Image (tube, rainbow, N blue to C red):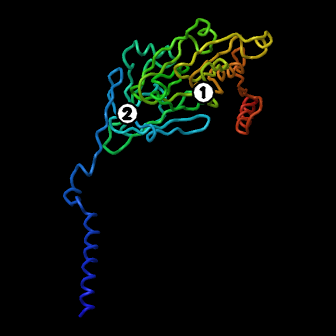
Amino acid sequence: MIPKILASSLRRPLAGLRSSKKSPSFSGVTRANMMKPSSLSSSSPAVQTTSSDGVVGTPINFDINSKIEGNESQIVTVALEPGQVLRAESGAMMYMTDGVEMNTTTGGGMSAGFQRMLTGQNVFISDYSYNGPDNTKGMVCLGTSFPAKILRLNVDEYGGKIVCQKGALLCASHTVDIQMEFTKKFSTGFFGGEGFVLQALTGEGDVFVTAGGTLIKRELEEGEELRISSGCLVGFTEGVDYDVEMIKGYKNVLFGGEGLFITTLKGPGLVWLQGQPPQRMISEIARRVPSGGGLGLAVPIGGMGGGGESGEGGGDGSSETQN
């Protein structure tokens, strides 16, 4: 009798422990609460932005939707979702998939187009948008006009402004504007290798710029000076002082191959340099073109030897003459 009483008294605390363990795991959670729409999705619709010329679009997440491919001559592929707009240099497209539409405009009137032309770009720009079904993407692939690397930069990370060489921009977010950046000194415009007008990229979003050859990134401290060959500049951040100075020594000027002036960059800020400037490549090609208008092509002349068929044709012709 006593063992039965002890057994029943021991089972009661164990049952209480089991019930106390189960109850906290389901406290406040019911099937009705799990099926509420607020608990299934908390995402908010994407915010649309408007460019300076009135183009409305959803910002592109280039971390996910862009890919740079190639080695010495690179291309960039951008995936567009419905409502997104990619602004690119006219004539740079390689291909676009079904559902992608191209709209070519001056980007704010002829004055804006003329301003872009002074910075080395075309008067017209092309806006690419995708009008396919939801949860699908369209692809746009862009290439460069000469063998070049493609560099992606976020304008917001560098104070909302990046100054580049003329014609550097390949494509960008639709909220990025191209403005003229004038050199501060008369001598800089004449001898700096980039002219009087540079290309200032302002606004919000990402830009893709081109650079020839090997690409170098240097961070300059306060007051640090870097002297570069004219034409090797790709871009620099706001705060960098851009100037030129005369090369010392007449032998360096006459035989150094760098000319009379050299470009100087003074910190603080970031600078990007290119190992193969397009102007240098073009000059090297032009130097090797034969002078005097000749193309240097071997033009075959009849009777100066040829294949079997031409030899047979020549023999037939001679026999007819003899007859």
Q: Residue at x 24, y 85 (%)?
A: 8
SS type, badge 1? strand
Identify which amino acid the numbered label 2 is placed on.
Pro
Question: What residue would you read off at disc 2?
Answer: 59
The quadrant the C terminus occupies is: top right
**Tag on residue 219?**
1
Counting from the top left corner in percent of width and height, residue 307 is at 73, 37
Position above or below: 15 against 228: below
Q: Residue at x 28, y 41 (%)?
A: 44
Extreme residue toward the front, this view = 2
Counting from the top left corner in percent of width and height, residue 267 is at 59, 20
Q: Residue at x 58, y 32 (%)?
A: 149
- In primary-sequence order, the first of circles 1 and 2 is 2
Extreme residue toward the right, this view = 251
Counting from the top left corner in percent of width and height, residue 218 is at 61, 28
Q: In front: mark 1 or mark 2?
A: 1
Left or right: 45 in relation to 114: left
Of residue 278 and residue 254, the one placed in the foreground of this image is 254
Q: Quadrant of residue 212?
A: top right
